[in-house]
Image: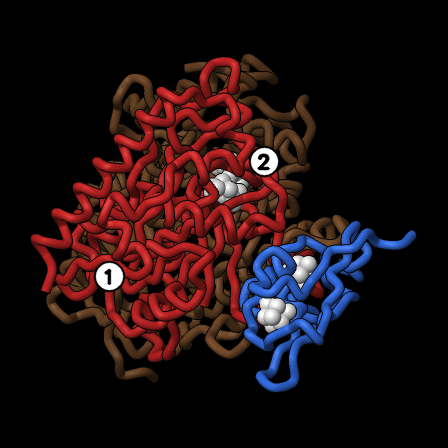
Chain colours: A blue, B red, C brown
Amino acid sequence: MGLELIPISRPAPGSGGLTGTWRTLKPLVDLAKCIDCGICWLYCPEAVIDWEKGKKISIDYAYCKGCGICAHECPVKAIEMAPEET
Amino acid sequence: MLSIPASCASVVQGLGPKSGIGMPLLNVPFASAASVATGIAEAFKQLGVKGRAVVWAGDGGTADIGFAAVSAAAERNSDVLYVMYDNEAYMNTGIQRSSETPKYAWTTTTPAYAGGKKEQKKDVALIMLAHGAPYVATANIAYPQDLYRKLKRAAEIEGFKFIHLFAPCPPGWSFDPSLTVEVARKAVETGYWILWEYDDGVFKLNPPSTIYADKSKRRPLKEYLKLQGRFAHLTDEQIAELEKEIDKRWDTVLKLAKAFGK
Amino acid sequence: MRQLASLKTALTGNYAVAYAVKMAKPHVIAAYPITPQTTIVEKLSEFVAKGELRASFVNVESEFSALATVYGASMAGARAFTATSSHGLFYMYEMLWWAAGSRAPIVMAVVTRTVGPPWNIHDEHNDILAIRDSGWAVAMASSVQEAFDLTVQAFRLAEKAYIPVAVGLDGFVLSHTVETLELPPQELVDEFLPPRSPNAPMPLRPGLPLTFGNIPSDDRIHAEHLKRIYWAHQEAKKAIKEIDAEYGKLLGRSYGGLVERRWLEDAKYAVVCMGAWCGDAEAAVESLRREGVPVGLMRLRFIRPFPDEEVAELEAAEKVVVFDRDITPAGGVLGREVASVLGRDKVVDVVAGIAGVDFKASDFKAAFRKALEAEKGVVLI
Ligand SMILES: Cc1ncc(C[n+]2csc(CCOP(=O)(O)OP(=O)(O)O)c2C)c(N)n1
Ligand code: SF4
Ligand code: SF4
Ligand SMILES: [Mg+2]
């Protein structure tokens, strides 16, 4: 079938644009403090934190919206929310 | 196979044609999700397709406008897993009260200067229980492992499954987004939200709510309320009254746990 | 020559529809009781309960949910059917548009009935006419046999054009009146109506992460979608004629597509009507012709898609009298629709038989004469 009968959506990464640009605060991780518990990974509502036990975390800033949940939930305060530079 | 009625979830899935979640998804009219999912489940059954019909709906779409359809699906025991994410108001349209808005809470249709909402929150999970649904549970976004386990368990069961998921809304409840999990956790720690599960005739409390059956272990309700702007106008008497209502809710739940415990 | 014989029998209009649905082998049926529709789904639930029809029969709590249920089933690839009347149809309103906008190939019987207040269960066409702009194809039968044939044809049309189809039949006048009809053998219905594709309008099943109905990133996507529904209706006109002709070849009866014509070749006057009372209109026209009045009849089988080209054939007539068994604050619906093709000067719109008031062949004759005197505009009987 050529044309679809109805407009169907298919997921594509980042189709909503770079939502990271919405951010006013940026989560900065102090990997030295990080105890590799994965709590921030578990709670990040945007699923932009990568975590594999033993490798610690990394944040995809292209899509992190800066909500600050990770910083608030980190048990050792290894994440700090810093004002976004303009 | 997901059905989503009009709600914030119709927005957060993203804009077509390039956004979508990693699941087959039908967006459907506000009051229709339970019935649409029933139709999907019946079609799958007749066509021999292996798949689960799941609804992801807000409190308004479930407890208010869609309630007749939800009740009917439960009564028929249609093979649907229904998740009601409860942000305690109509958020998509800009914070209007729903039957799930708690007593005294501010919304745009229950102004604080008039004392907030006058009526108490409808306990939909207990109403679903009274329908005789094979699986009913409450959940809370601060406890994702508990939610994950409940979703997995529900997916194994044939018939109508209902999960009432507590989901704080930062702008709707007026708190900083970084506190989202904190607010949800405080709801459990103060006893405001009770995690329980009814499975195969057995009713039980789930941790960590289990310890809060002992009232002395609960944190003061104020710790939960003070995080949120929507309760800023409450007097100490009103807070005391709400605490009494929480005691009553616990009383019911504990009686159920006793009556239908193992 | 085919060896398969039809079964000649006598049924009410509602049972004829139920038999047609059974022979169409739907997967999912959902409905809610309302007079005069109820006996259709009662019969269908009996077929399912007795194992004569392998389908899910879903008992719902409202007509809104009936349509929502068959909508979910239809989108998931099932052949699905529902039926309703009047208040039930209006209770579905939001879902009607959603189903048409999803191109869900649902078939629904609408047993026409007045709309209250007051409570009145008798026949009138306001209910089915009110859904004409929702995106559904809307048809009306004129006999018990046609109620059967049209229902079978409706599944073919819905699944070819991806337009949901409403099959109308007059409350009581057809729904509860026993007439003789031929029930074709199942094999021929199977041949006419092959299983539907589960992949259109979209393949909806686990493992394929496709979404329908989310907010468009550009309103023009939505606009194009709406225009395509318009074009689908235009194309459906051809499909309706083809399906009707094919049905005739295979099952022995065809009706002429979107309209049925009688004595129009030499007609100076034309009568236009829709539904069961066209039988009485035809008797009146025949009697007028015997009296020497050169009058013909056009019966509308479909009002969506609207038979614009066929109605335009009446251009040659001096006067066109449209009979409406409905009333709106602007007059009759069909009168205005026909006038939109032929112009207001040529058309007289007779509003009659509303609220279920009896209207016989002799009444048609008298009303026709009154209409010719009126020359144009609306005549309320
Ligand atoms: C029939 C109908 N009435 C009203 C609306 C407008 N509407 C869209 S979403 C919504 C509120 C949804 O509330 P809820 O189900 O709690 O979900 P939330 O937005 O809070 O996530 C309303 C009133 C609609 N889409 N359909
Ligand atoms: S700030 Fe929010 S979105 Fe960004 S990584 Fe932390 S939790 Fe995720
Ligand atoms: S929550 Fe804190 S300690 Fe745990 S993984 Fe994240 S940054 Fe590291
Ligand atoms: Mg809500």
Q: Between tags 2 and 1, which lies in front?
A: 2
Tell me the CA gap for discs 2 and 1: 33 Å
Q: Which residue is mark 2?
A: B174
Looking at the image, which is closer to me, B14 or B253? Answer: B253
Instruction: Give the image location of residue B226, x and y in percent.
Output: 50, 34
On screen, residue C249 versus residue C210, left or right, reads left
Q: Residue at x 34, y 66 (%)?
A: B150
Q: Residue at x 23, y 39 (%)?
A: B249
Instruction: Give the image location of residue B217, x and y in percent.
Output: 29, 48
Looking at the image, which is closer to me, B49 or C336? Answer: B49
Which picture quadrant has residue B127? top left
Which picture quadrant has residue C360? top left
Looking at the image, which is closer to me, C347 or B121? Answer: B121
Q: Which residue of the protein is positioned furthest toward the bottom in this rendering?
A: A54
Instruction: Give the image location of residue A5, x and y in percent.
Output: 62, 64
Query: Which amino acid, by three-letter code, is at mark 1?
Result: Tyr
Chain of residue at mark 2? B
Q: Which residue is mark 1?
A: B135
Please tell me whether residue C329 is drawn above or below residue A20 in the rendered image.
Answer: above
